[in-house]
Amino acid sequence: MRLRIALAALAVLSLAPHRIAVEGRFGGLVTTSSPTLGVPLDFGLRVTPGGRTYFEALIGPWFFFNSGDAVRGHAAFGFGLEQRHFSFGLEIGGLTGSNAMIGGRLAWRI
């Protein structure tokens, strides 16, 4: 079974010393393969080694409504570039009971 997901999320970063940030991310999602709503909840660590490049690791539960699997585990690795007011990159991960996921990331700082 393929699970296609459209996701919108809000992330909160807490800067720690030496270009390391702790991240919390939550939002809403819709699966397009069978209409199901859900809420992703991820926690992560972001490292910016120098310049504009970042690397991040995320893990957390994703809650699905109208589905047999109410809670699925999510883990992902991402990387990308940070600009002054926005960042963009690629995320590769997976959900328990599903195939691997690849997603693009485009974020604006508020």
Image: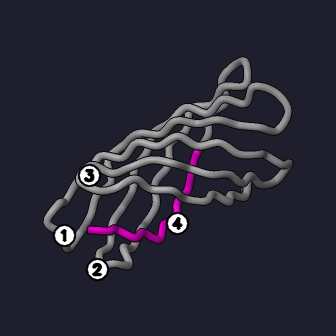
Provide the residue designation for mark 2: 34
**Left or right of residue 4, residue 80 in this image:** right
Q: Which of marks 2 and 1 is nearer the N terminus?
A: 2
Q: How far apart are the two marked residues, 3 and 4, measured between alpha carbons?
A: 18 Å
- Mark 4: secondary structure: strand
Residue 10 located left or right of residue 110:
left
Q: In this view, does 59 lie to the left or right of 104?
A: left
Alpha carbons under labels 3 and 1: distance apart:
11 Å
Query: Where in the figure is residue 53, as x and y percent of width and height?
Result: 77, 37
* Residue 64 place in picture, x, y as percent: 26, 64
The magenta-colored residue range is: 1-12
Q: How far apart are marks 2 and 1 (CA)?
A: 9 Å
Query: Dot 2 surroundings within 10 Å: few (below 14), some, or many (20 or more)?
Result: few
Whether the magenta-drawn stretch holds residue 6 is answered as yes
Query: Reading the chain from its start, which is encountered first: label 1 or label 4?
Result: 4
What is the three-letter code of the residue carrying label 2? Ser
Q: Gap in Å between the C-alphas at discs 4 and 2?
A: 18 Å
Labels 4 and 2 touching (C-beta < 8 A): no
Residue behind mark 4: 8
- The residue sitting at 66% across, 25% down in the picture is 20
Amino acid on which the number 1 mark rests in the picture? Ser
Say which label, 3 or 2, has the lower sequence index. Answer: 2
Label located before the other in sequence (3 or 4): 4
Magenta segment, prevailing SS (helix, strand or loop): strand
Q: Residues within 10 Å of mark 3 (few under 14, many from 20)?
A: some
- Image x and y of residue 99, in percent: 34, 56
Residue 90 horizontal/vertical position (percent) = 62, 51
* Amino acid type at mark 4: Ala
Tag shown at residue 72? 3
The residue tagged 1 is 67
Q: Tell me: residue 68, above or below residue 49.
A: below
